[in-house]
Image (cartoon, rainbow, N blue to C red):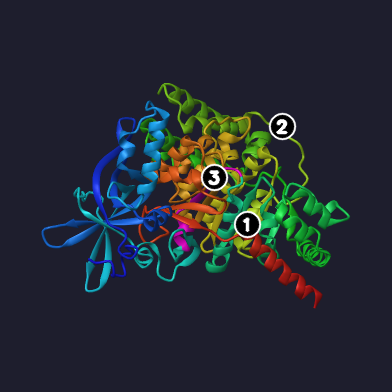
Amino acid sequence: MGKDTPWFDDINGAFNARLRETSIKTSYEEGKIVLKSIIGVFEASFNLAVLDRLSKPSFIAVERPTEDELKYLIYETFSVRPLHIQELSMDVSMPKALRNDFLVKIYSMWGDSEDTWVDIGAVYTGYVMDVSNGSINFQYDPNMMPLVGAKAHLLSSWAIDKLVNVEKGVEIGEIIGFQHKLKIDILNLVKFHGGVFGFTGCGKSNLTSIIVRKVLHNLPNTSIFIIDVAGEYSINLLDEIINYGMILSTEDFLSSDDILESFFASQVIPESLEDKIVGNSVLREALEYHLLNLVGGNRICKVDLEGRESDKLSYMISLIDELRDDQNQLTKILASELYYRLNAIASKLPHEITIHEIATKDEYRDVKRSILNLINNVLARLESGRSRTKFNGVLEIFRDKLVNVEYEEHVESGLSPWDVAELIMGGGNRLMVAYIPDPLQARDFTSKFIGALFVLRKRRLGGPRILVVLDEAQEFIPDDVRKEDLTFQSNLDVERLLRQGRKYRIHGWISTQRVARLNVNAIQQLHSYYAGTLPRSYDRHVIADASGVSPEILDKTAQLDTGEWLFISHKATRRKNIPLFIKTPNNEDILLDNLMKLAEKFKV
């Protein structure tokens, strides 16, 4: 195929390359291969236009003849290096004057000698391109091996569009190095869970806010709930909240004489926006009007974490029910046995009874004793298994709730997690931001809220699809867990959401800068990953293993700028597992534009 075909961009004939060597790189975990990469090194004739083009993300199609036809194996580049043959014989042990002569000679020969070339490192994507009747088709065949010496071509922007973009998909950013927007299946992005990972300042909350906007405007039957520890999203999405949603918080904005000042003081406002929002008197006046409307419409509410509505006996039974499918054989047997016995007890009790009621009311004294005997018996049999499992932790929490009771008459002062779950399930408020700055309270709320969602979804048909966004996810699913700080409980419930939520139309989105401190089992439940600047090699390794993408590609994230991402998705793009470097829009520009429009309407 020549350079003039629409699927190749051989830079006006300047790109002249062949596959020089190939190797298979594998990584192992517990003696098993978890990742296999086919690495290729291509040698291209030196040309400055080629070198500059390869400095951006690129895809290479290498010819692969078969018995019947010519196919092309698709590689993604991860490194480029210009080389001169005399570099190979130069050594720092040479006298300085001789080295200087070599360097001068090398520099003068770039592009004017066949002794210069470009080495290109690339990894096989697993996709094979067929060309027939003026069109191209891609098929997944990760086992087709390349032939050393085969001619290589650069894929054109047109071919990349055919390779990755979903027809009539939602634009989510610009593919770096190509003249195309990335168009994805936004429903699959939500349905199969996803996450944003990157170092401080790389734009995680900005990207998450963009995704929330895309979901709101493209999936009308989807509601979004954000658990915000840092206090960013009530500002980042203020225009959308005014139109679609409500703000919840453990903080009391409503007690202040100046609600706007109290609200701004509690939130993180980016420096680039502070003067434009806080310093604009017309905009301040409009925002005060809209915030008072939110208050008047009960759309700014206080969260009450003392409520026990989600702490039902039925909730603990449902956790034990899920453990009946555990891979541990002893857990499976004991969970089934306990599940049926607890159900027999529960069938004789009020349907909505709480563990707190069983623990504190005299009429349930025998019920409490029976349940404790069952729990202690199962725990003793689990101990004989000589290995702690998640089941031990669930039962210990159950027992603690029955035994360690500090009873106080509770006065409702706000919305309980159960109330909040009822509201989001009702679909009236499509965007809810819960600002809970204390990590302990945030974990408590999250556990109860997720539990309530599952109980409600199992009881009733219909209602919106729900996306739960966890900012600062390391606070909820750390790898090091304790019962006393509620990290065990929040880990249990968030992992439950990621494992079981899809069949109940409850989905998860996590955002964090501290990948190394996350529960790896939870990360592996995601199907879409946005990796920003990740300077630590261990963080990149975790994402590479979880996503199945070559570490060589992940290593390039260390060089990304703010707003640039490596996007990996098994479901949201046309082809699974093709990582793409993209540039996403700036949420601050969208926010400010929309707030100014609100201010203009207010003036009129």
Q: Quadrant of the N terminus?
A: bottom left
Residue 109, horizontal then vertical, whole percent: 35, 48
Q: Nearer the viewer, residue 74 or 248?
A: 74
**Mark toward the start of the polypeptide (1 vs 3):** 3
Query: Are the two marked residues, 1 and 3, in contact with CB atoms closer than 8 angstroms?
Result: no
**Mark toward the start of the polypeptide (2 vs 3):** 3
Q: Secondary structure at mark 1?
A: helix
Q: Nearer the viewer, residue 558 or 540?
A: 558
Binning the other alpha carbons within 10 Å of mark 2 as few (below 14), some (14 to 19) or many (20 upward) gives few
Q: Secondary structure at mark 3?
A: loop
| The disc label shown at residue 406, or none | 2
Q: Which residues are magenta?
A: 186-200
Q: Nearer the viewer, residue 246 or 591?
A: 591
Residue, x 52% and y 33% (percent of image)?
Answer: 479
Residue, x 51% and y 58% (percent of image)?
Answer: 583
Residue 62, horizontal then vertical, whole percent: 25, 55
Q: How far apart, in angstroms, are the residues tagged by discs 2 and 1? A: 27 Å
Q: Which residue is mark 1?
A: 422
Q: Which residue is mark 3?
A: 198
Up/down of 559 relative to 274, above or below = above
Residue, x 73% and y 61% (percent of image)?
Answer: 299
Residue, x 54% and y 42% (percent of image)?
Answer: 493
- Residue type of the residue flagged with mark 1: Glu
